[in-house]
Amino acid sequence: MEADRHQESSCPASGSLLDFRSLDPYAFYAQQRRESAVTWDAGMDAWLVLSHELCTLVERDEDLFAAAYAHHDGSDEIRGRRSLLTLTGREHRRLHDFFSGALSAKAIERTCAAIRRTINAQLDQLAPLGRAELDKDFAERVPIAVIAEVLGLPATDEEALCRCREAMVVLLAWFESGGAVPELVERARSAIRTLEDVIRPVALERREQPKDDLISKLWEFGPMQYQDWDETDVVDQCKVILQAGSVTTQDLLCSLVYRVLMDDPLRERILDDTNAVPLLVEETLRRENPVQLRMRVANADTELGGKHIRGGDRLYVVNAAANRDPARYERPDELDLDRPGIYSHLAFNVGPRLCVGRWLARLEATEAVPAILARLPRLRLDPDSAPPRFQQWMFRAYRPLHVVFDA
Ligand code: HEM
């Protein structure tokens, strides 16, 4: 497909997903899945779960397949004592339900004007220039500013946002390493303090003077649920939301822009029909899957896909592979806006860890694509700059996005 022509060889280099940091992993996923929906990856010292059916099963059954992010070195300080990512069972459910309500499709409708403002403020800066790198100049900036707005942080304080963006890069590297690199643990501890410094003054202020924002809602919710709820709990929730929502949405925006740039008929269709934009967002989530895989740990011996899994074994649910499972999707490698069951992808997980920010991410992406095309006329890749590639590992997107357009 033309859209993938910038990618390096996607031939599997070896038997481990670890070797695919700079290579398109989809041929590897398909090859592994043809052998078995559950395969052992010796390089990762873990099972890879590769089919739609079994990823769904593992994600739904948290009693058997636990989300074990609390085991990462540095997790206590970096995540905090009541973090959605590390809590389990009823405690997790309680916070999850709060965020699901606070960030529901209905609740975030109110942020639409702020999202448009943020997108346009960024495009105002780029429009006169005639060229940009849309990852760094747009995709990295918009999600974090939107989340700041939702939380009630100073969304126009560019200096603070810049510090947060830098912290995010370090935290992402720590997370992808699973806490296994001591130097990254130290750097992540320092990065998290950067986020805390930005959030804490606002958290304290909102306790006294609530406003219409998520930090104020956390002050309403927390003390009703926990006697010892304090500003550290509020700060910890904000840290999770900032981290979980920024890089993921950045990656989605990058892959969307790349897709539109590489496919003229697709660009025509979404320019002609705004109803097609949300469909493009869903198909890009399915096909490029910003969060390729997530880790789980088996709590007991069990069978999965005909393999014997021992209690304590690590598993990666490879949602990106599940989203191109031919048993679930016809022509899974093709982007097809008219695909039946277009919302059935696993880009946001399913089960108890279903992404609570999915409606916000969708809204941002749906607003961003037409705005970019309208504000940056004759947008195209810069033929004189490095082409985009489907880079990184657990979190992935097409980047860099050097583009030119009519100023
Ligand atoms: C395209 C954008 C996004 C993608 C692809 C994405 C994907 C995911 C995935 C796969 C999970 C499951 C994690 C796991 O099982 O270990 C998740 C969880 C989560 N996401 Fe997102 N996400 C996105 C945007 C957002 C945004 C914008 C926010 C916040 C505003 C957010 C907040 C969260 C939170 C708090 C969790 C943890 C939920 C829980 O454990 O209960 N995400 N996300």
Image (cartoon, rainbow, N blue to C red):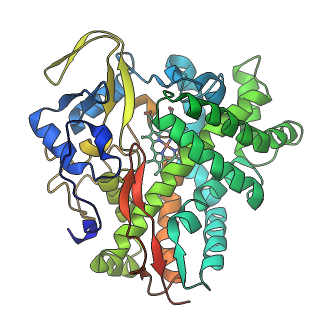
Residue furthest left as drawn:
35
Q: Position of residue 98 (x, y in %)?
A: 60, 33
In the picture shown, does residue 224 fall above or below 273? above
The quadrant of the picture occupied by the C terminus is bottom right
- Residue at image point 51% right, 64% down: 135
- Residue at image point 51% right, 24% down: 72
Q: Is residue 135 left or right of residue 302?
A: right
Q: Position of residue 375 (x, y in %)?
A: 54, 82
In the picture shown, does residue 327 fall above or below 380? above
Could you tell me how many numbered marks the image carries? Answer: 0
The quadrant of the picture occupied by the N terminus is bottom left
Residue 43, visible in the rendered structure: yes
Residue 277, visible in the rendered structure: no
Q: Is residue 238 left or right of residue 50?
A: right
Q: Nearer the viewer, residue 339 or 132?
A: 132
Answer with the quarter of the image where residue 254 lies.
bottom left
Q: Position of residue 285 (x, y in %)?
A: 36, 54
Q: Nearer the viewer, residue 156 or 386?
A: 386
Q: Is residue 134 left or right of residue 397?
A: right
